[in-house]
Amino acid sequence: MAELDDTGATVATGAIVATTAEPSRAYAWYAVGVLVLAYAFSFLDRQVLSLLVEPIKRDLGLSDTEISLLQGFSFALFNALGGLPIGRLVDTGRRMTIIPIGIAFWSLATAGCGLVRGFAGLLLCRMAVGVGEASLTPSAYSVIADAVPRKRLGLALGIFSMGVHLGAGLAFVLGGALVASLSTGGGPDWPLVGRLHPWQATFVVVGLPGLLVAAWTATLREPARRGAGPTPLPLREVLAYFRANARSLTALMLCAAFASMTSYGVTAWSPSFLVRTFGWSIAEAGRSYGAIVIVCGMLGVVAGGLAGDRLVARGVRNGRLMVMAAASACALPFTVAAPLMSDPTTALLLMAPATFLGTVTIGTGPAALQEILPNRMRGLGTSLAVLVVNLIGLGLGPTLIALMTDYVIGDETQLRYSLALVPLATLTLSAACGLAALKPYLRSRALLDGFGAGS
């Protein structure tokens, strides 16, 4: 059985054959736009919990450390465990079937977070969200790498990564508005389930619209695989390629992972920092911090993608790694200083460049990874990167800050010091790993040039 891609080229739906056909430029960017929306909903569902920390702690009697397990580790572990088999499916199957199924699954799981009555149920639902969201990133990276011209790959993946900050920012802005609205009268009564706390109703309202996004992504066409052979590569050959590139892959992934540890940790706890330190309401914290995340975060990922493209176009083959290392180093002073300020205005002003620079790596890292992976290894390779980045970044970032607050500082009102000390270490490590990756990355690009399955 075969189908037509948007160029009119015939593409097998079982074993996808090698072809040089590409989607039209307009359709390729349309597909990127739809995937940005899907990614935004992914992070909207993932990050809305960070705005609901204080009411969840109050109603369920949880500590900062228990909250951090809901924010990070439970999600990250199951996102990672689900990611590897899903990544293999991405390399061997139809990516535009995998994506809508995953979106529908995580959207229902997010809504389910609002129907549970205790920590265990919330933990299980967060695990399910993690499994569902594992489908999007490897599928989308692979699709974009095949649909968009190679010289625009950094820009395309940077634009896709805008979804991270659009979704996270909307989680804070819309989440705060929803909590304020739903708090009237002590919370709404819902058919079948009765009265829900405002934070529970927020999960339901945020989760269900994702089903519409799932339906939209299901209409996208599967792009022909660029540079792919007629059958999937044996897993043995894939693992051998990874071993041959272990130094570059490890350093690249750790650079991104430590930057993500900073980003996830700071993003998870900044609303609570504003509430605890300056007495702000949830709506005030969400509105102000959410605006910074949306504007500065989106600008950062696009700037990172463009800067990487520019350096590579000038012949600097490891230019994307240079951008990643420099961004982490430059983000450090702003990130450390912001929570130590004595007034909220100065703190927010410093959060703006910290967010911009901290997200440059997110816009640059995916393109850097795709440039050293053959087509039929992109799904599994991306899933491996997501595993490392999520386990270290998302799994440990929020929890390290919570552990320092609970057990080192011992006072949750002094969250600001945890928000300064943890990024001091993680951004230093990110910059060091980026520098360590420069030479191995050049060797990996040369190896891919001779691999024959190239980019």
Image (cartoon, rainbow, N blue to C red):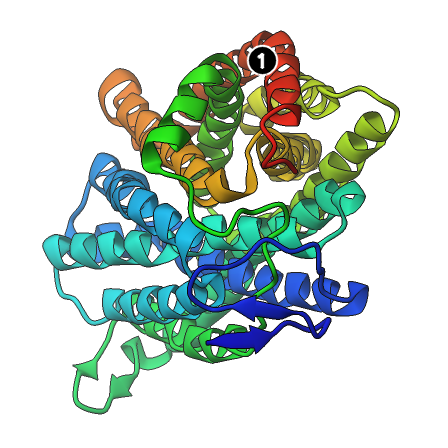
| Other residues around mark 1 within 10 Å, as few (<14) / some (14–19) / many (≥20) | many
- Expressed as whole percent of the image width and height from the top left, the position of residue 355 reads 63, 36
Q: Amino acid at mark 1?
A: Ala
Q: Is residue 33 left or right of residue 206?
A: right
Say if residue 51 shows up in the picture.
no
Q: Residue at x 70, y 75 (%)?
A: 8
Is residue 390 or residue 170 the one in the foreground?
390
Q: Which residue is mark 1?
A: 437
Q: Is residue 286 above or below residue 423?
A: below
Q: Is residue 105 above or below residue 145?
A: below
Q: Is residue 424 left or right of residue 108?
A: right
Q: Residue at x 76, y 31 (%)?
A: 308
Is residue 25 or residue 285 the one in the foreground?
25
Q: Residue at x 36, y 35 (%)?
A: 387
Q: How many marks?
A: 1
Q: Is residue 142 above or below residue 202?
A: above
Q: Dot 1 lies on which element? A: loop
Quarter that holds the C terminus:
top right
- Expressed as whole percent of the image width and height from the top left, the position of residue 394 reads 38, 36
